Image (tube, rainbow, N blue to C red):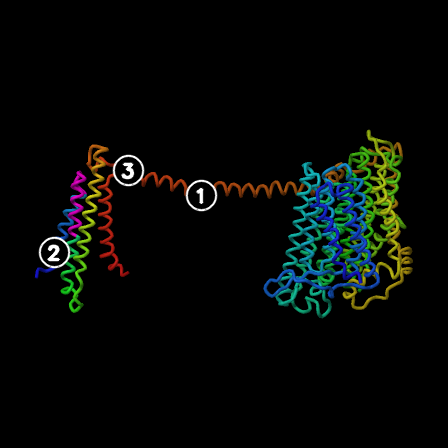
Amino acid sequence: MFLDYGWLIPVIPFAAFLVVSFLPRRYLGWEDGCGIAIAGAGGAFILSMLVVWDVVNGNILTTASPRYTWLVVGSYEITFGVWIDQLTAVMLVVISVVGTLVVIYSGGYMHEEGAGRKRYYAEIMLFISVMYGLVLSDNYLQMFIFWELVGLCSYLLIGFWYEKPSAASAAKRAFIVTRVGDIMFMAGIIILFKYVGQANPGSDPLHFGTLFQQGANSILEQGWISQNMLTLATALIFGGAIGKSAQFPLHEWLPDAMEGPTTVSALIHAATMVKAGVYLTARSFPLLVQTPDTLIFVAAIGGITALLAATTALAANDIKRVLAYSTISQLGYMILALGAGGILVIKAQSTSGYDAAMFHLMNHGFFKALLFLCAGSVIHAVATNDMRQMGGLRKVMPITSITMLIGSLAIAGIPPLSGFWSKDEVLSAVYSAGRFDWVFFVIWAMGVATAFLTAFYMFRMWFLTFAGEKRSEYHAHESPKIMTVPLMLLAALALTSGFVLFIGTGFGSFMGSSIESLIEHAAEAGTPLDLLVEILTSWLTYVALGLATIGILIAYRIYYMPGFDRAVFAKGVPGWFQRTLENRWYISKFYDDFAYNVVYGFSKLADLFDRYVIDGIVNGFAYLGANMGAVIRKAQSGNVQRYTSLIVVGIILLLVFVLYIVPWGGW
Amino acid sequence: MIPIMYWLILSLLLFTVGAYGVLSRKNAIVVLMSIEIMLNAANINFVAFSSYSSVLHPGSPEPAALGQVFALFSIAIAAAEVAVGLAIFLVVYRRYKTIDVDKINILRW
């Protein structure tokens, strides 16, 4: 019932964007547009919740959605419509909850920005609007358009303090690096359009309804596209996800994106936009399960990213960078769960990997937004990002420290917080995929190692920030209510969102029903109670939990217990390893060197070619003309009789030519 | 009737004399006179071809005296041209005190 109004969800924040952008500042009211922005985000939140309620009650709006022709190319029609299923619902929950709370929190956090706030609220409203548009899209082209708009908003918001050179360059970096992924995404769309469109004239070849048919109607079985081409297309579409979700090797833009305001980091670079890549992968699941090779690639990228980012986080000293790397690492978890989930769908007729990925996405959205907003609260108070300058904040910022502790426990995977349940689901899905391909055992081991490292670096961060003694001069104070209330709400969600796994028929069966068409013979679904028993009795649970606990204890020993010489611990780590981590595995440096030596070198070559060859030719012609003129003009002697004699000679030659040469030549 | 070739040879001789005068004489007035001779050579051709048209194209209808009319036009234009040319030479002479065509050569590169 509310599904029919789903298209209004992006319209509400967009209206707020227009109002904030075009109304003069004196009419914007409280905090230069924060009130309007809260109204926009809140309106979208209420409508989203109504739509989600419809979906929870089993109504979905997919192929039946009204579609409007947007573009006619030859015999093809590109239509725009909405697509609301369980996957969309999960994304709507994350975007609306986090988006609304972040906008409210911004009311306090951005207070000192002055005139910049108008721009800030306009951009954040545009971002929320296009993010809703992205998850509501019902075809790849519509999705791609919103995908690019999301990238644009990210660029604008990272570069919010554009007068700071590091922010301007981080914004450019984010834009360019994600562009690499976007090009791949576009290439994947073009392949699908070409093959499916050619086989199917007069249709809308990019509509999900066309592409996602299964069984005998699938685009592969109908012979519209070859297996190899489909594998290429899905791999390229996943390439888009690599860029947007900051997966290895395109992950280095995300830590740099921390140059933006912390609220932006929370909203875009932790809770929503980077999830767009995961969402794209999940949305493309009906295609991915037809290409097992791509699925292995997806899972491997996820595993590598999770471990690589977690190790890099160990050596980071900037509080936001630690969180950025943990975001990359957790996104890796989601991606590897999707890769494993695809294999499980094919081989075991089980949706557990897919469910686990989306479950982790939702939980991560809440606790990572919480962690970032806590970090924002800390930065607001002490005016530095460097954890080495902090310490002892627990006493002055009790609410922030407790909510951040909850967030840290959640991400570390300590029961009964949300992260425990979803991380456990992810790892058990990957482990069960190991039955079909040994690669998944390796990836599982990487995931478990990541769980250990995550617990360690999160508590390293917490102890460095909140525990111990003050390490520099600052006058910290607890943040105002407008900032702490969103923190408390998010902390409550981080505590409880894991339990949706057991509500009703369980989150798993809810998510699974969005891809039920992929399953031929669904296994007997266990009740939520069976699932709980299974989690509590599996040794996998205790391995991950035990390692996480050890990680926290090591962090406690090193960074909290007084009198412990950190040098002793550091001595155990070889110097080159420490340096490698501090330099982020030299990946960033590699890109810089690559850009400097190869790209800049090539540019220099092109410059030389332009300067000497192209300009040489052009200048040569000019020189020739000028000098020939200097010679030939001497014929203009001013002597009338010389002209006359030349005319006479000319006429004689012409006559000889016409009368003798022309007939003789046979013309 | 005198064959047409004689008229044409007369015309050619006159034209050559005129052309030689134009190319070799230094005095602008003599050059102008030579041009008049060349024009008259052309006029002779006009009249000759016109008079001999029935011989050259037997059987064709008797033409109007087109060639003679052209010759008259040519004479009229030549008269006008001489008037303009002499006026220019007069002005040139007042300015440079000479009408030697070798010396009047400042209109150049």
Name which residue lies at 22% across and 33% down: B94
Of helix, strand and loop, which one carries label 1? helix
Q: CA distance from mark 2 to mark 1?
A: 59 Å
Same chain shared by disc 1 and disc 3: no
Q: Which residue is mark 2?
A: B7
For disc 2, the chain is B
Q: Which circle, 2 or 1, is nearer the viewer? A: 2
Circle 3 Cα neighbour tier, 10 Å, few/some/many (<14 / 14–19 / ≥20) = few
Left or right of residue A466, residue A597 in this image: left
Up the image or down, B82 lies above or below A78; here it is above
- Main SS, magenta region, reads helix
Q: Which residue is mark 3?
A: B107
- Amino acid marked by disc 2: Trp
Q: Quadrant of residue A486?
A: top right
Q: Is residue B27 magenta?
A: yes
Decide which of tag 3 and tag 2 comes sooner along the chain.
2
Name which residue lies at 77% across and 66% down: A517
- Looking at the rendering, the stretch of residues picked out in magenta corresponds to B23-41
